[in-house]
Image (cartoon, grey):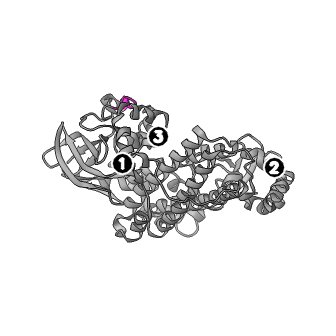
């Protein structure tokens, strides 16, 4: 109820954000308007509404990715403290802040759809043939105890797997999801994680 | 119960591997460092790799192959020795690190050189630990070799294959040669001396061209970036100003730009609209 009200307000006040969110050009006229109000509007990433059309894959994608990102927050947080090279810490921090916004965004959409933001049980996409998720509590906790000299190797390998998993979730959404904005978001997730993988592999090699 | 479902799926073998092409959902692991062929493809260091660049963890095929692609027809590029795969210099032994996107019960990890197993690690059907790495003695060999690393899954008929090109005993150990180059290759040398002439012009160029330059440059290089068009692959520092689609943005969080981190509503954590 309340949320619908907010959504209507956003649509009325800043329609260009919604257009922008759908992946078109835009923002030429967004610029002057944004100067004064930008920080207030902009901070409400979660007010980007997804629309009422969705299917089970859309819901599962968001729920799985929220779980993935919340784990990612822990891992990135640890990396900002324990990484020895500034490039590794910087990547971790940038991932942390961008994914924090993504969590807000996705929780907003699930609330809009009246669906829970949490998973009943963490399962791997590989569970049907015996696979366990790549990162559980134990694996994440290991990053806080691994000797500092081995930290970056441990973190990068674990986080590579984690971001590969996010790409898998995104691909599932692209193949079987129905909500346009969720699919557009999935494409962004696929791209950003794929490029983060490139950076991490190069950091591992260096 | 779940196992019973698992076995028939696994025995589909070829069907399963063709599904990998359609969706990467069956992907599970690869050697990340020293970089395997699929890691080099995923990192963008080797071009024209085909589908494997998007899913380096997907080289799954029935156990027993000695090929780099494990016999998985979806990834023929991995077997192509004419691609001039860069070889990583290693000493008399090398430590192989794995990325696992799903933790399968594991029979063994086996490393082959010239078709012969040189090291086997038996996991006795356990779930792999958080970090998986193996140190393999390569002292019997020298020069360029391709190490085939195989992860034999404990509860399916399949394995995961990674070929790692190494130069054994070449120019000493791996770390000294590679580490300094990546530290500050792009922005540091050019910008730092010019912008901060007052305080430390003499010491900076002589002593620390690489590593320390990254630490000292942030305050110095804010100005030059102003107004340039946003682009991927650029190391942006806090305060840098870019334009994107006619709008100016200031960097809030230092980062190296990638696709989908362009300034806009989705990335306000990185960019402040001006």
Q: Residue A143 carries which label?
A: none
Q: Does the magenta stretch include residue B79?
A: no
Q: Which residue is nearer to you in this view: B7 or B178?
A: B7
Q: Is residue A93 rendered to the left or right of residue A1?
A: left
Q: Circle 1: is it few (<14), some (14-19), or many (20+) Cα within 10 Å?
A: some
Q: Which numbered disc, 1 or 3, marks the residue that appears first in the sequence?
A: 1
Query: Secondary structure beneath disc 3?
Result: helix
| Subunit under mark 2 | A
Q: Mark 2 points at which residue?
A: A30
Q: Residue B3 carries which label?
A: 1
Q: How far apart are marks 3 and 2 (CA)?
A: 38 Å
Q: Is residue A69 rendered to the left or right of residue B89?
A: right
- Majority secondary structure in the magenta region: loop
Task: Give the quadrant of the C terminus of chain B.
Answer: bottom right
Q: Does the magenta stretch include residue B76?
A: yes
Q: Which residue lies at the image location 22% right of the left edge and 39% below the top edge?
A: B145
Q: Is residue A28 rendered to the left or right of residue B196?
A: right
Q: Residue B24 carries which label?
A: 3
């Amino acid at each position: 109820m309340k949320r619908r009200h907010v959504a209507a307000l956003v649509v009325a006040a800043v329609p260009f954000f919604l257009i922008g969110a759908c992946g078109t050009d835009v923002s030429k006229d967004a610029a002057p308007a944004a100067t004064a109000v930008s920080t207030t509007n902009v901070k409400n990433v979660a007010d980007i509404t997804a629309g009422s059309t969705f299917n089970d894959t859309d819901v599962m994608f968001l729920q799985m990715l929220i779980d993935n990102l919340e784990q990612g927050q822990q891992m990135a947080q640890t990396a900002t403290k324990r990484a020895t090279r500034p490039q590794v810490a910087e990547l971790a921090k940038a991932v942390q802040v961008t994914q924090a916004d993504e969590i807000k965004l996705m929780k907003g959409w699930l609330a809009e759809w009246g669906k829970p933001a949490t998973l009943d049980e963490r399962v791997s996409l590989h569970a049907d043939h015996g696979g366990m998720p790549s990162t559980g509590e134990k694996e994440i906790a290991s990053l806080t105890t691994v000797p500092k000299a081995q930290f970056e190797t441990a973190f990068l390998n674990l986080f590579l797997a984690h971001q590969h998993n996010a790409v898998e979730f995104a691909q599932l959404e692209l193949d079987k999801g129905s909500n346009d904005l969720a699919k557009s978001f999935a494409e962004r997730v696929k791209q950003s994680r794929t490029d983060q993988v490139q950076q991490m592999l190069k950091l591992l090699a260096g | 119960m779940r196992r019973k479902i698992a076995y028939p799926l696994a025995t589909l073998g070829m069907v399963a591997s063709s599904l990998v092409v359609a969706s990467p959902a069956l992907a599970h692991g690869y050697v990340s460092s020293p970089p395997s062929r699929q890691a080099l493809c995923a990192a963008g260091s080797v071009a024209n790799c085909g589908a494997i660049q998007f899913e380096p963890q997907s080289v799954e095929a029935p156990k027993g192959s000695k090929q780099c692609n494990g016999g998985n027809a979806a990834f023929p590029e991995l077997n192509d020795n004419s691609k001039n795969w860069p070889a990583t210099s290693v000493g008399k032994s090398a430590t192989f690190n794995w990325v696992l996107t799903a933790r399968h019960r594991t029979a063994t990890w086996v490393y082959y050189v010239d078709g012969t197993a040189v090291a086997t690690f038996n996991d006795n059907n356990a779930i792999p630990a958080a970090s998986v790495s193996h140190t393999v003695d390569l002292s019997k060999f020298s020069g360029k070799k391709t190490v085939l690393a195989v992860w034999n899954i404990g509860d399916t008929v399949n394995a995961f294959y990674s070929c790692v090109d190494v130069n054994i005993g070449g120019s000493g150990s791996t770390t000294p040669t590679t580490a300094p180059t990546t530290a500050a290759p792009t922005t540091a040398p050019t910008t730092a001396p010019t912008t901060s002439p007052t305080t430390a012009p003499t010491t900076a160029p002589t002593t620390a061209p690489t590593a320390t330059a990254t630490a000292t440059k942030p305050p110095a290089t804010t100005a030059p970036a102003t107004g340039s068009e946003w682009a991927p692959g650029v190391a942006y520092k806090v305060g840098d100003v870019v334009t994107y689609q006619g709008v100016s943005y200031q960097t809030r969080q230092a980062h190296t730009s990638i696709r989908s981190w362009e300034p806009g509503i989705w990335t306000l954590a990185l960019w402040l609209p001006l």
